[in-house]
Amino acid sequence: MHLTLTNCPNCNGPLRELILHSGLHYSRVECAECERFIRWGRSPSSVAKQQILEHKINWLAARTSLNEWEASFIASIGQQIDNRKNLSPKQTEWVERLYQKYA
C-alpha cells in the first residue's frame, strides 16, 4: 500500500537502518553513502498494529451493510491512510467500534 524507498533520493546510495536502543524513536534510516537522514523507522510491533488496522479498514470497506455515514467514514480514512497520514485516536476507536459491530 505504501511506497518504500530503497535508495537515497540524494545520491541513489543504499539505505541502512540503525536501531536505536534508547530515546523516542525505534530506528534511524539513513543513506549508507552520504549519511543523509531519510526518516525515523517504526518498531515491528507498530508496523504490525498498522497492518491489522489497515486490514480492518479494508474489510469494512468491502461491507455492503454499512450505513451512509459509516461507509463515508471508512472511505475517508482509507484515503487518509493511502496518503500516509496517521489516524487520530478517535478515528482508530471508531474503526474498532465498527469492526466489532460488523465482524
Image (cartoon, rainbow, N blue to C red):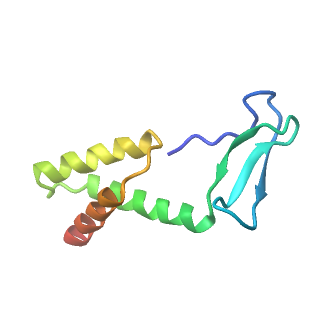
Q: Is residue 100 above or below residue 46?
A: below
Residue at the image position 30 percent from the left and 64 percent from the top: 93
Q: Position of residue 72 (x, y in %)?
A: 20, 45
Q: Residue 56 in the image: state x and y as whole percent.
A: 35, 62
Looking at the image, residue 79 lies above or below residue 55 = above
Q: Residue furthest front?
A: 23
**Observer-nearest residue: 65 or 90?**
90
Q: Is residue 34 left or right of residue 58?
A: right
- Which one is nearer the viewer's eye here, 12 or 88? 88
Q: Is residue 6 visible?
A: no
Picture quadrant of residue 98: bottom left
Q: Residue at x 77, y 43 (%)?
A: 30
Looking at this view, is 28 or 49 the one in front? 28
Count of residue discs: 0
56 versus 35 height, above or below: below
Kindly tell me whether residue 89 is visible in this rendering.
yes
Q: Position of residue 5 (x, y in %)?
A: 67, 39
The structure residue drawn at horizontal position 41% and vertical position 61%, both measured from the top left corner, is 53
